[in-house]
Amino acid sequence: MQKIKWEEYGRIAVYIDNANIIHSPRELGWYISLEKLSNFFKSSGNLQLIKLFDAIPEEKELNKLLRKRKGSFTKKDYKIYLERSNKQRDFFKRAGEEWEIDIVLKPLRFILDKKTKKFIPKGDCDVDLTVDAIQKRKRYDSIFLVSGDGDYVAMVKYLKRCKKRVIVISTRNVVANILIEIANEYIKFNKLRDELFLKPYRKP
C-alpha cells in the first residue's frame, strides 16, 4: 500500500470492534497484530485516541448459569468460557499497558436457544462504541472505524453531518456493503498486510 498522507486526516481517532479482528483471519489467511495496528496509527503523529470494544465472559455470570441451568450449561462449558475469559483479560491488560490501547469491556451475555437447549454467547458492542465515538467527536477530525458491521451506518451518517471524515477498515467478505458506501473511505485489511501481519491463519 502506498504511504498514507496522514496530514490529510487531521486529528485521528481509532475505534475497534474486536469482533471484526476475530472474524477477519479466516478470510484474510493471516492474523492481525493489535500491537502493530496501534503502532501504525501512532505513526500518524496526530493520534488522539485508540479504543477497542469487546465482551468477555464473567465468572459471576458463568457460576449463575452453572447453578440454574443444569444440562443446558455444563461444567465443561463453564471451564471453556472461564479459561477463555482469563486469557482474554491477560491479553487486554497487555494491550492497555504496553500498546496503549484503551480497552472497553462489557459482560458477555448468554441466550438460550429454545431448539437446541444450549446457550449462545451474545456480545454486541455497537451501541457502546457508537455512544463513545459521538461523545468524543470534538476530539478528532477523522475516525478510523475497524468494523464491518452495518449497524454502524447511523453513527457514520451522524458523524459525517458533524463534518467528520469516516474511514472504514475491514475485510471484504465480513463488511456490509452499505457501510462501505456510506463511509468517506474504505480500506481493506489486505492492503495493510505488510504493516499489520502477525502470523498465518491456521484452521482450529
Image: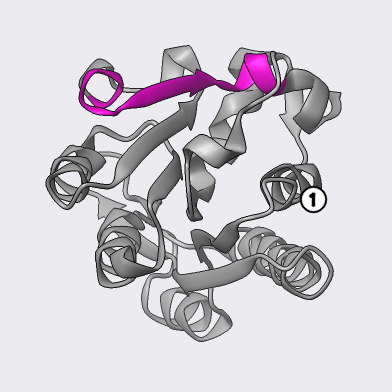
**Which corner quadrant of the image does residue 122 belong to?**
bottom left
Towards the viewer: 32 or 203: 32
Residue 118 in view (yes/no): yes
The three-letter code of the residue at mark 1 reads: Glu
Which residue is pictured at 27% across the width and 58% down the height? 130
**Pointer 1: what residue?**
35
Of the 4 image quadrants, the one containing the N terminus is top right
Towards the viewer: 74 or 3: 3
Determine whether, in the image, residue 148 is placed left or right of residue 29.
left
Question: Considering only vertical position in the picture, is 82 above or below 30?
Answer: below
Residue 161 screen position, x and y as percent: 12, 46
Which residue is pictured at 72% across the width and 71% down the height? 96
Determine whether, in the image, residue 92 is placed left or right of residue 148.
right
Residue 77 screen position, x and y as percent: 59, 59
**Which corner quadrant of the image does residue 139 belong to?**
bottom left
Q: Residue furthest front?
A: 7
Question: Considering only vertical position in the picture, is 135 above or below 188?
Answer: below
Residue 202 in view (yes/no): no
**Which corner quadrant of the image does residue 33 belong to?**
top right
Residue 184 is inside the magenta segment = yes
| Span shown in magenta | 179-192
**Quick one: SS at disc 1?**
helix
Which residue is pictured at 57% across the width and 81% down the height? 59
Determine whether, in the image, residue 115 is placed left or right of residue 89.
left
Question: Considering only vertical position in the picture, is 180 above or below 21?
Answer: above
Question: Considering only vertical position in the picture, is 88 above or below 29?
Answer: below
